[in-house]
Amino acid sequence: MNLGLRYFLLAATLLTFAFNCRATTAVAQDFIYTSSGELQSHERLLRRPDIAGAQVVYNWKQLETGPGQYDFSRIEADLAYLQAMHKTLFIQVQDRFFSPDARNIPRYLLTDPSYGGGLVAQTDQPGEGRPAVSGWVAQQWNPQVQLRYQKLLQALAEKFDGRIGGVNLPETAVDIKMRGDRTGFSCDKYFNAELENMKFARQVFRQSMVVQYVNFWPCEWNNDHNYMGRLFRTAAEQGIGLGGPDIVPYRRGQMKNAYPFFAKYKDRLPLIAMAVQEPTLTYINPDTAKPYTKAEFETFGRDYLGARIVFWSTSAPWLK
């Protein structure tokens, strides 16, 4: 097969995939999600005919070993593995981490003074039984850090655009202790940096889907800074998909933040892709006093949020 025909067929396949995600009101396509290095342990699930593929999370440190030195061998292996089963790969490029020991960005960002330490701690409120430092997030509001992240996205696009189903950018929620912060963080700077990153991803990924996860913004409640409104409007204007890490039907916090915007924009976005992750499975339906069922997640995700893809935790009961 000549190269031109090959790329034509790839483009046609992705366009069909996007159309099917957006144009149908049928049950959303089901994917599993997992971490890098664990994909092959879920072969039994991936061979199910009702599983369309996988979202795999790759942390920044795995993908960039030094300034501009990239190692995409894990993605290549996962892509080949899924393609052999005629399944689709979504990659999530992780720049924030939810464990005190996870500082998973390239070492040069942590040690070179021009990057200001690279990371900043995420914190939990005291008294919740969790450590003061609950995780870390890259300083995307530092122009030097953001530049390196965008170069990573560009390198990924040069290698995988048109070959993968899409790229996911991590959730917008962060919990940073702003008093005494020395990184130059502000809520406006953070919002603008995240907006710039998703627009940049759309510029470099011209064939594969781009999906920005959005749930909460620091400093904002009920769109009182218009962060949520501006992000959804920009995504609709520029053909950027949106999604989120949790489907929790009508939960108050989400209903005061991202959820109403999904409902409002579901016919204007190229793709809405939501996840049901491990913590989501622990939520109790107040009407039944039992954990939410697959049907309850899907009905709310599809009919209210407009989700056309659901990334499921491999521990979801219906997958066992």
Image (cartoon, rainbow, N blue to C red):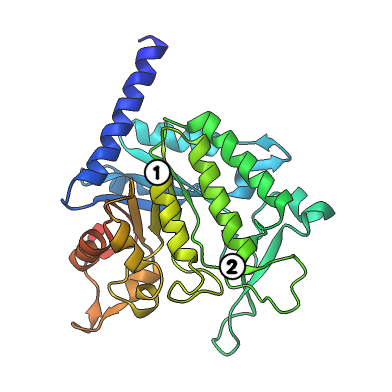
Question: Which residue occupies the foreground of this view, 79 or 21?
Answer: 21
Q: Where is mark 2, residue-wise?
A: 99
The spot of residue 202 in percent (x, y) is 48, 41
Neighbour class for label 2 at 10 Å: few (<14), some, many (≥20)? few
The spot of residue 233 in percent (x, y) is 41, 55
Q: Which quadrant, please, contains the N terminus? A: top left
Q: Amino acid at mark 2?
A: Ser
The spot of residue 206 in percent (x, y) is 45, 33
What's the residue at 41%, 71% (across, down)? 257
Q: How many marks?
A: 2
Q: Secondary structure at mark 1?
A: loop
Q: Amino acid at mark 1?
A: Gly
Q: Where is mark 1, residue-wise?
A: 239
Neighbour class for label 1 at 10 Å: few (<14), some, many (≥20)? some
What's the residue at 23%, 58% (across, down)? 302
Question: Which residue occupies the foreground of this view, 91 or 48?
Answer: 91
Q: Quadrant of residue 286?
A: bottom left
Q: Is residue 184 left or right of residue 61?
A: right
Q: Secondary structure at mark 2?
A: loop
